[in-house]
């Protein structure tokens, strides 16, 4: 049975087909365990009334070796048809002209949100004094920005053409070393901003979270990043007037009626459960996450900022190796949940692979399809395991009295602790 979408609602059958890519390198070692843990949690939660019908689809090295293609059309069709899937890490093919498989999947299905929840698990080593204050969910825009891949290399005829256009037709005189420069383009649109910010606000409302922060560099890049901020606020005020209160509105009230009045209106809004929409410049945000992480809840940001922010926040809670992620199109419902690390060729076959990034991505998937009980069981099991000092070698060696387990021992323990 396939997952469908009616209006805003995903329709989840009791036995949905979930396509999965096993993944290259350590993918082979973690994916079967993740499936086993998920199956156990689902069984415990729903006693057979609900099950997942896993369907393997090929991608990466395994696909190339079996069918001669890195990303067979059938794989793309399966994700398109069944809507929700999960993937292990994939080897990026080396050679010009071959796209990253992850990028190809994101682009084909227009998965415009890269979703990264960040939290700390008690017991996991961290550089912070108060890692328990970090509860952040990052909505990173996935399709635009300087990451769109529109660039020309220095010295090429294409670059000369672009340069000529800029200098002669657009009057650009600011390119410092025109003879040796490469040029990239940074597209940021109203639609791209709005769908991302809409998804972030909807998520905050659904999960009763206090704020959405627009993180940007609009002070320098006024029309692109500044546009993101402006359009983000406008969307909140237009589409969610009764459910949000914005910093932009706060400032307006402050200017017209004074600070005290603005604070009063803010307090009323917060007390009535409205989400506060605010913004911060990206560099200040990175400092603030270390100094006062409790001020941030849901983050909406552009592609490049989001890349840096995701890794910094994951590292703050010691979770860079266990951070989960997903790429989602909230309009069509398409979503691919994924391990955020690579194929870890240096530890393949050594029993050292940590399954938690993919496992927590599977938890996100269970929550996405509304099977919260099963997701919660797995999260609680991990909380107890980490608190007891259990971990694969990457985590156990930094834990106080850490008890190192192999990939399969750790996975069995997760099932035991469910
Ligand atoms: P990597 O993430 O595979 O490895 C970096 C370091 O982290 C290594 O020391 C590795 O042993 C360790 N590590 C990663 N995952 C781990 C886990 N689950 N448990 C324990 N230790 C873990 O990054 P690298 O070496 O840069 O890339 C290797 C390959 O993976 C490349 O082909 C790259 O393109 C690909 N890659 C794929 C990604 C994806 O499919 N989402 C993401 C990043 C890289």
Image (spheres, rainbow, N blue to C red):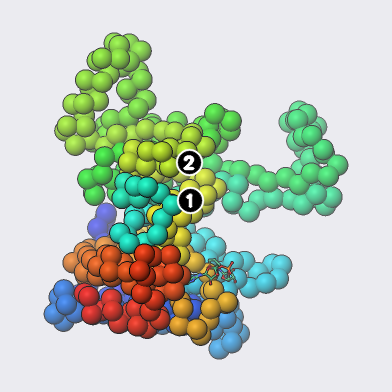
| Quadrant that contains the N terminus | bottom left
Disc marking residue 286: 2
Looking at the image, which is closer to me, 97 or 181?
181
Asked whether, in this view, residue 384 is left or right of residue 65, the answer is left
Element class at badge 1: helix
- Tell me if residue 52 can be seen: no
Q: Residues within 10 Å of mark 1 (few under 14, many from 20)?
A: some
Q: Earlier in the sequence, mark 2 or mark 1?
A: 2
Please name the residue that numbered disc 1 is placed on. Answer: 312
* Cα separation between marks 2 and 1: 8 Å
Q: Visible in this render: residue 370?
A: yes
The residue drawn where x is 22% and y is 75% is: 417
- The vertical placement of 67 against 237, above or below, is below
Give x and y (percent) for residue 44.
Answer: 16, 77
x, y (%) of residue 95? 70, 71
- Residue in the picture at 32% in, 29% down: 246
* Ligand 1 rendered quadrant: bottom right
């Amino acid at each position: 049975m396939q997952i469908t979408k009616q209006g805003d609602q995903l329709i989840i059958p009791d036995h949905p087909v979930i396509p999965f890519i096993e993944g290259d390198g350590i993918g082979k070692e973690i994916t079967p365990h993740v499936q086993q843990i998920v199956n156990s949690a689902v069984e415990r939660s729903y006693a057979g009334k609900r099950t997942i019908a896993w369907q393997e689809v090929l991608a990466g090295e395994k696909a190339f070796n079996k069918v001669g293609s890195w990303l067979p059309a059938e794989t793309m069709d399966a994700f398109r048809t069944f809507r929700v899937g999960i993937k292990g890490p994939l080897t990026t093919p080396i050679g010009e002209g071959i796209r990253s498989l992850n990028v190809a999947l994101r682009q084909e299905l227009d998965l415009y949100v890269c979703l990264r929840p960040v939290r700390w698990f008690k017991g996991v080593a961290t550089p912070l004094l108060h890692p328990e204050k970090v509860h952040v969910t990052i909505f990173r825009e996935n399709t635009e920005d300087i990451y769109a891949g529109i660039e020309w290399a220095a010295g090429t005829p294409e670059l000369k053409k672009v340069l000529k256009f800029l200098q002669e037709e657009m009057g650009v005189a600011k390119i410092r070393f025109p003879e040796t420069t490469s040029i990239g383009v940074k597209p940021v649109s109203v639609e791209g901003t709005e769908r991302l910010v809409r998804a972030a606000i909807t998520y905050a409302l659904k999960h009763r979270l206090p704020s959405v922060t627009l993180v940007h560099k609009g002070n320098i890049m006024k029309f692109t990043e500044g546009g993101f901020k402006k359009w983000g606020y406008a969307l909140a005020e237009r589409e969610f007037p009764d459910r949000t209160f914005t910093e932009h509105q706060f400032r307006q009230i402050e200017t017209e009626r004074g600070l005290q009045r603005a604070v009063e209106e803010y307090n009323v809004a917060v007390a009535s459960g409205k989400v506060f929409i605010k913004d911060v410049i990206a560099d200040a945000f990175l400092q603030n996450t270390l100094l006062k992480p409790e001020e941030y809840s849901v983050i909406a940001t552009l592609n490049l900022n989001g890349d840096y922010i995701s890794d910094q926040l994951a590292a703050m809670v010691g979770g860079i190796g266990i951070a989960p992620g997903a790429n989602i199109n909230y309009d069509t419902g398409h979503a691919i949940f994924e391990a955020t690390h690579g194929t870890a060729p240096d530890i393949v076959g050594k029993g050292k692979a940590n399954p938690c990034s993919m496992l927590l991505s599977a938890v996100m998937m269970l929550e996405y399809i509304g099977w919260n009980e099963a997701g919660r069981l797995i999260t609680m099991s991990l909380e107890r395991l980490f608190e007891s000092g259990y971990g694969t070698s990457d985590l156990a060696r930094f834990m106080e009295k850490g008890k190192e387990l192999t990939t399969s021992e750790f996975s069995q323990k997760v099932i035991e602790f469910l």
